[in-house]
Amino acid sequence: MIINRTIDNRQTQMGPHNIKGKIVSGVFWNVLQLIINKTFSFAIKLVLAKFLFPEQFGLVGMAAVFTSFVQVFNELGIGAALVQRKDEHLRDSHFYTAFWTGVVWSVGIFLLITFVVAPLAANFYNEPLLRSIIPVLSIGVLSSPVNLVHRAQLTKKMDFKKLAFIGNASTIFAGAVALVLALQGAGVWSLVFNSVASFVIAMPLYFRATGWMPKLIWEKQAFNDIFGFGIYTTGTSILNNLLYNLDYLLIGKLVSASALGVYTFAFVLTDTFRNQFTIMMNKVMYPVYGRHQDDPGLLKKYYLKVVTYNSLIIYPIMVLLIILGEPLILNFFGSKWEESILPMKILALSVMVHMLVSGHASLLRGQGRPKLELKLQFFKAVFLYAPLITLGIYKYGIVGASWACVAYKVLEVILIQYYLKKVVDISIKDILTHLKVPFIASAVSFVLTSMLYLAGVHYLICAMVLGLTYTGIVVMLMHEELMLQYRELKKGRVKQVA
């Protein structure tokens, strides 16, 4: 018998209308969180880039490569298992078991990072300072399992308003800490604490948001239930980590800390934003996919919407960086970051290619197919990404790494499209049809803005023209649908207030 049900049982009885309202509301709060987070983070990066140098960014990048390979084991996929599992199959013991498993495991992970990984990384890169940086950078390992149950509960309830508030508050606090440290001359440590300080605010806010408190209960059956799912998602996370950090590892080792700093900066301006936005959308859609995993038609409809709206948001930013990346970097960040301009433009192109299959992992996992997701990630990591990125860096440095990312994204789209067709009957024609508007808006904006910039118009005016042109075309072609989404959002917010 299930007692003290944390997840409101009314969630299980949602009809299509209520689900749609929850999705629109969830997207709104997650977009708001992303805007605040990224705007504030970008402002902090702007200030830090004025005070710091590429070598210091590269040093933190080196540390992050090693810590991330260990941190990926931290949650064991437990949070994803709690969200994916249907409400009627969840007991309170699942939450208690998840909490205590995560806490004990994270302590072991932190000790491993401090006493094994830090010395190993320092020797690998011949950078003694990494022995001190890595343990501090890994403090967040201890807080993550404490928060995972709260995040899972809020995600299952699709209470993205509270998640957005916690995310924004912690980001602003961490950014303020980094800014103060940078102004005080802390150098590389301002970047380190910018990465870990958020947990100080996030942890108490999570407890307050859910009202959930752990009890000293651990059940073997509950552990088997969640770990059986989580082991596949953990394996996928390991391979994802390889995909995201192999280039950092090789550039830091084969080229230099300065080159890694330049490449990291280019990635921050392009793929990092794409990654954060798609993570935001996945947080909204993952519980929806799990709830409707037996309705392929509805899954197809929702997934194509996700691809469309992801692209609508990401494409104009990438077009802006491709056309006006040079004046933006030189004027905002200075000539010391000039070498990041070409890699940034190439990476922006890779992001645009990736949007053709954005969010596919969340769809597969939500359907309860983490094993297929793991197999796909293994194939991509071992047979596509690793050889391409290694060859690119060895031959042409950071520019070669950037072009390798483009080649990898093209091959990834072909592979994922094959399985989307088999699993949910989504063809490449379906995807291209739904991306017609962002394609048209991007093409027109690109041509017009390029002509103005080549004619000598100030880059800020060109940026404004690009934004207005893109927005105008989207509104003109999608007016009815956008108004429908607005009404759904308004309706959802009214229900929340009621």
Image (cartoon, helix red, strand yellow):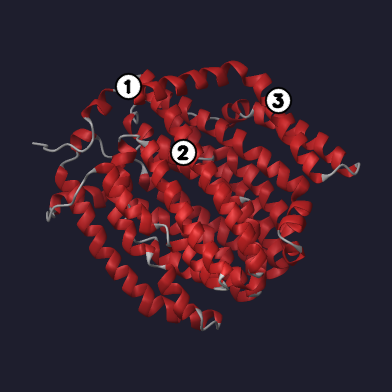
Q: Which kind of residue does numbered mark 2 sit on?
A: Asn
Q: Which kind of residue does numbered mark 3 sit on?
A: Gly
Q: Residue at x 48, y 18 (%)?
A: 487
Give how far across and how far down residue 285 sits, in percent.
Answer: 42, 35
Q: Residue at x 30, y 23 (%)?
A: 14
Left or right relative to 170: residue 124: right
Left or right relative to 63: residue 14: left
Residue 264 in view of the camera:
no
Q: Which kind of residue does numbered mark 1 sit on?
A: Ala
Q: Residues within 10 Å of mark 3 (few under 14, many from 20)?
A: some
Mark 3 or 2, nearer chain start:
2
Q: Which residue is mark 2?
A: 30
Q: Tell whether label 2 touches label 1 (CB within 8 Å).
A: no
Residue 498, numbered label: 1
Q: Residues within 10 Å of mark 1 (few under 14, many from 20)?
A: few
Based on the displayed image, in which of its 4 quarters is residue 111 positioned?
bottom left
Q: CA distance from mark 1 to mark 3?
A: 34 Å
Left or right relative to 205: residue 1: left
| Above or below 273: residue 498 | above
| Above or below 319: residue 244 | below
Image quadrant in which the N terminus is located: top left
Mark 1 or 2, nearer chain start:
2
